[in-house]
Image: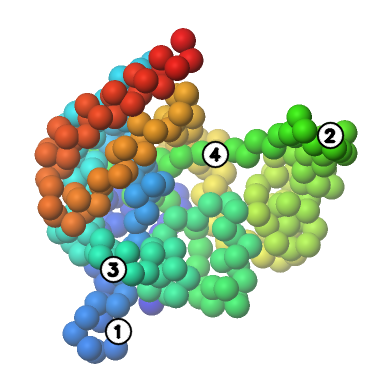
């Protein structure tokens, strides 16, 4: 890999992203086979940024109707699969089946891959990931805004727990206690698996620990906060499955997506086939709670 960093204040357009990925895609050992790629794309959580940045969505605003048969959604999906089919800057579907995108990232075979806050400690560990890296934004499509999905973690205590009070205290410690948040975020201990839930801690001691080197963290930490807080160029959203009774309708979409990525179906063909199946599943989900 060569050293080339994106300016986090100016996310790549899709076209710029493709250009950079092409420069990283190469045969490094001269055997005639590509063994290093510009990016690795995991369907389950790396397509949404393309869809949303192109002004599209999976569902209508009331989360009752599947909304993928639109020009905006199809264009976003086409751009996503073109990274594999047209530009060939990702491993093929068959190559992904033999070694997944996450494993290829850890092996240094991909220049770009998704990073959650929970990944930081592992990626900063030189034994796990012996490469220099930093955070950057997803590419922008027609809206000009880089977008990604936000998530949260919910702890619960089983009604059958023998130690319900102690379990509840542990949850409180992990979620709201300042000392607990310092441990999870790496302010103490130096290894981070999440950003602090306490805003003042996130904007204060957490950032100070990164700046003074106490906490091993990529320098472009503002990328995370830009998605969380929103800017004129960044936006984070909860996945649409957050607002539906279950995620089975989305699972159906993912099940056959590789048929588009390997070229055996077009985007139009796949949308026409899968939308009715998704809608039936979504209808059943809502009926189950009404």
From where the camera sits, is residue 262 visible? yes
Rounded to the nearest angstrom, the CA distance separating label 1 from label 4 is 37 Å
Q: Which residue is mark 3?
A: 95
Residue 132 numbered mark, or none: none
| Residue at disc 3, secondary structure | helix
Rounded to the nearest angstrom, the CA distance separating label 4 from label 3 is 29 Å
Q: Position of residue 186 (x, y in %)?
A: 73, 57
Q: Which residue is mark 4?
A: 151
Rounded to the nearest angstrom, the CA distance separating label 1 from label 2 is 56 Å
Q: Which residue is mark 2?
A: 164
Q: Are the two marked residues, 4 and 2, in contact with CB atoms closer than 8 angstroms?
A: no
Rounded to the nearest angstrom, the CA distance separating label 4 from label 2 is 26 Å
Q: Residue at x 67, y 65 (%)?
A: 216
Q: Residue at x 80, y 58 (%)?
A: 188
Q: Is residue 205 left or right of residue 235?
A: right
Q: Position of residue 280 (x, y in %)?
A: 29, 23
Q: Is residue 97 left or right of residue 192?
A: left
Q: Depth check: give the residue in front, 57 or 289.
A: 289
Q: Position of residue 270 (x, y in %)?
A: 17, 40
Decide which of tag 3 and tag 2 comes sooner along the chain. Answer: 3
| Residue at disc 1, secondary structure | loop
From where the camera sits, is residue 199 visible? no
Q: Which residue is mark 1?
A: 28
The total number of labels drawn is: 4
| Residue at disc 2, secondary structure | helix
Q: Residue at x 65, y 54 (%)?
A: 193
Q: Depth check: give the residue in front, 3 or 176.
A: 176
Q: Position of residue 81 (x, y in %)?
A: 22, 51
Rounded to the nearest angstrom, the CA distance separating label 3 from label 2 is 47 Å
């Amino acid at each position: 890999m060569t050293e080339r960093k994106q300016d986090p204040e100016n996310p790549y357009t899709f076209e710029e992203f493709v250009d950079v990925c092409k420069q990283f895609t190469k045969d490094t050992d001269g055997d005639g086979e590509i063994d290093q790629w510009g990016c690795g794309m995991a369907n389950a959580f790396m397509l949404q940024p393309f869809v949303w940045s192109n002004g599209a969505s999976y569902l209508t605003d009331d989360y009752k109707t599947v909304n993928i048969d639109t020009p905006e959604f199809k264009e976003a999906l086409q751009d996503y699969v073109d990274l594999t089919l047209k530009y060939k800057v990702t491993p093929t579907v068959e190559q992904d089946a033999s070694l997944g995108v996450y494993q290829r990232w850890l092996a240094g075979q991909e220049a770009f891959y998704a990073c959650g806050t929970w990944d930081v400690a592992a990626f900063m560990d030189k034994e796990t990931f012996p490469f220099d890296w930093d955070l950057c934004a997803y590419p922008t499509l027609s809206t000009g805004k880089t977008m990604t999905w936000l998530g949260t973690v919910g702890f619960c205590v089983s009604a059958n727990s023998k130690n319900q009070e102690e379990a509840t205290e542990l949850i409180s410690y992990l979620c709201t206690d300042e000392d607990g948040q310092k441990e999870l975020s790496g302010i103490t201990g130096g290894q981070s698996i999440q950003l602090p839930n306490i805003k003042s801690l996130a904007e204060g001691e957490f950032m100070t620990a990164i700046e003074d080197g106490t906490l091993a963290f990529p320098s472009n930490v503002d990328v995370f906060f830009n998605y969380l807080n929103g800017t004129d160029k960044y936006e984070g959203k909860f996945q649409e499955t957050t607002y539906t009774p279950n995620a089975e309708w989305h699972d159906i979409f993912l099940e056959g997506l590789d048929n588009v990525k390997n070229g055996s179906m077009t985007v139009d063909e796949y949308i026409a086939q899968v939308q009715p199946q998704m809608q039936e599943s979504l209808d059943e989900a809502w009926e189950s709670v009404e």
